[in-house]
Every structure is written in C-alpha cells, then in structure tokens.
Image (cartoon, grey):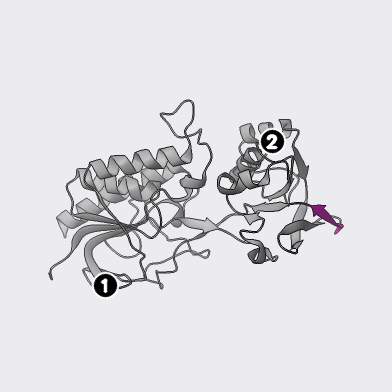
C-alpha cells in the first residue's frame, strides 16, 4: 500500500464529527477533522437544547458545541479549517481534494451535515435584509417588530417561541391544520399570546423595497390569498444534505442523503456517513453522536482488518 497521510479523516465538525473525533483520538488513531467554517455545526445557532442527556436544566447550543470541541482537542484531535472540494474513492487509499492540495486516508467519515431548505419565493433577495433561517442569530434585530415564521416541525415551533422574546408578534404559518412539533413545544406555542397560528397556508411571495415589508400567503384548502404585513420572515421548512463535494462517490437516496448501514458504512468500504447527512429517520444531536461512535469504532476495525 502506498504511503497514507492519515488513518482516518472526518469531514464536518458538528456534533457527529466532533464525537467521531473524540472516539478516534481516544483510540490513538492518526486522525484529522476538516471543517470549512466553525466547529459546532447547526447547534451553534440553536438557542436552547433540552433533550440532550446530562443537562437537566438544558444548555445553549453554543455552550454544548464548545464543550464537545474542547473535549476533542484535549484528547489530541487535530482540527483544520479547510473545505473539501471533491473525493476520489476508487482506490484503496481514499483521496480528499482540498483547494491547494490532496490528502489520503485509509478510512473516511462524512459528517458534513445539512443546510436549511429554501422556498424559491424571492427570499434570496432579502437574505440579510429581513429573511433569516436562524432566530438565535437575527432575532435581536427585530425588537417590537412583527415577524412571519414558516414551518411546523420542532425547529420552526421552538424558534418561533424564541422570536417572541424580541418581537411584538409572530405569525406561524403552516401548510397543515396541525403542527408536527413535539407536544411540549406545541403547548408552549399555543400558550404564547404573541404567536398567531396561520393554518393550512403556504407562503407565495416576499415583498419589500429595502427589506421585507410583507409576506403573501395562500390557503391551500380555499385558495384564498392574503398579505401579512411583517418586518421579517424566518424560514424553517426542512433541510438539504451538504454533499456537493461527493460527485456520486457514494450511494445516496432520492433526496441526496447518503445511504449507510447499521455500522454507518456507505456503499464504499471504509467510508462512513453519520449525522444529518445520512438517510436516518431522526435527525437529533443524540442520534448524531450515536452514529459517530459507531462509525469511529467501525473505521478502527476496518483499518485493523485491512
């Protein structure tokens, strides 16, 4: 076998990537974690986490990410801020192509996560001018303002509640007649007098001059259209996998999420997918770290048996 740079390379430093790094570092593997932005992933923009074991009072997403990163680094994990451009997985050694160089590894864990899905109703013109996908980041800009929040899952409802700490009023627009969020979050939303639920409706346009001034919506049952006057619009309608660098190197499902089995191995031996980027029935921090522990141990066994 030709000389390899690493035993294991991990792509992505969210909870899954950091956990995989912790396990690999404890196993004394020669491991490198690559992150194109800031370690922590999506939990960095999560206001408060109540369902991660060990924190009965809850913990902010930023603090949890910092604790994970600190633990990984204290175990000796090397983290570099580099973006992966493509992969070559056709040879025994896996090649990772970066901007100015390539590195090789015996095994690979893809933990690149996912990004918010957009609606295609003109929101791109107003990103940073009233349209946001992150309440924690941008809610303070809307003190005593009126906002439209779009979605009905856990993220949408939890973030809409967070918006009410700043906004005077929040319209929560959902295409169905009941929310999909956890019951405890629904109860909090229904009890919050700053939130007005707009049922059976979809957004059809975002309007404004210098920034967001209104959001057009349509009732999917009656086709009635109306305009909600608003100073901002927050969108939480699902996620898309961060897999632009894959170039069909591993098998994905119809939505682009990476297929991986019980041991997190993909269609390529020695390559594993964990967390939000894989085809999983539940995308939570706790499932991401479970995926990562399995993948790191699987990678270690793969190398030992190669």
Residue found farthest to the top: 56
Q: Is residue 177 visible?
A: yes
Near mark 2 (Cα within 10 A), the count class, few <14, some 14-19 or many ≥20, is many
Dominant secondary-structure state across the stretch colored magenta:
strand
Quadrant of the rendered image containing residue 245: bottom left
Q: Is residue 91 magenta?
A: no
Along the viewing direction, whichever of 208 and 94 lies nearer the viewer: 208
In the rendered view, does 51 fall on the left or right side of 93? Answer: right
Q: Nearer the viewer, residue 153 or 165?
A: 165
As helix, strand or loop, the secondary structure at mark 2 comes to: helix
Lateral position of residue 238 relative to residue 170, left or right: left
Q: Which residue is mark 2?
A: 189
Between discs 1 and 2, the one toward the N terminus: 1
Q: Position of residue 199 (x, y in %)?
A: 78, 47
Report the residue at 76% width, 57% height from top: 213
Please give the label number shown on residue 101.
1
Which residue is located at x 25 percent, y 54 percent?
Answer: 299
Mark 1 vs mark 2, CA separation in Å: 50 Å
Query: In which quadrant of the rendered view does residue 160 lie?
Result: top right
| Magenta span of residues | 223-230
289 versus 78 height, above or below? above
Q: Position of residue 293 (x, y in %)?
A: 31, 45
Q: Is residue 207 left or right of residue 29?
A: right
- Kindly report which numbered mark, 1 or 2, lies closer to the viewer in this rendering: 1
């Amino acid at each position: 076998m030709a000389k390899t740079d690493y035993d294991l390379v991990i792509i992505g430093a969210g909870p899954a990537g950091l956990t995989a790094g912790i396990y690999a570092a404890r196993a004394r593997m020669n491991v490198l974690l690559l992150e194109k932005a800031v370690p922590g992933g999506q939990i960095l923009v999560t206001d408060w986490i109540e369902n991660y074991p060990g924190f009965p009072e809850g913990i902010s997403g930023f603090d949890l990410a910092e604790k994970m990163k600190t633990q990984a680094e204290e175990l000796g994990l090397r983290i570099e801020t580099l973006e992966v451009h493509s992969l070559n997985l056709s040879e025994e050694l896996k090649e990772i192509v970066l901007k100015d160089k390539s590195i090789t590894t015996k095994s690979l864990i893809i933990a690149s996560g996912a990004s918010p899905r957009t609606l295609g109703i003109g929101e791109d013109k107003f990103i940073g001018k009233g349209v946001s996908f992150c309440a924690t980041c941008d809610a303070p800009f809307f003190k005593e303002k009126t906002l439209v929040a779009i979605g009905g899952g856990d993220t949408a409802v939890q973030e809409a509640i967070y918006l009410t700490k700043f906004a005077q009023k929040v319209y929560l627009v959902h295409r169905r007649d009941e929310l999909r969020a956890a019951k405890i979050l629904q109860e909090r939303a229904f009890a919050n007098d700053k939130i007005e639920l707009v049922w059976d409706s979809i957004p059809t346009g975002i309007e404004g001059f210098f920034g967001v001034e209104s959001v057009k919506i349509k009732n999917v049952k009656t086709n009635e259209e109306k305009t909600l006057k608003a100073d901002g619009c927050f969108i939480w309608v699902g996620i898309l996998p961060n897999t632009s660098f894959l170039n069909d190197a591993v098998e994905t499902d119809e939505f682009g999420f990476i297929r991986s089995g019980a041991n997190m191995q993909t269609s390529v031996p020695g390559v594993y997918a964990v967390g939000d980027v894989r085809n999983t029935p539940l995308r939570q921090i706790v499932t991401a770290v479970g995926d990562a522990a399995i993948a790191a141990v699987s990678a270690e066994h793969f190398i030992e048996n190669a």
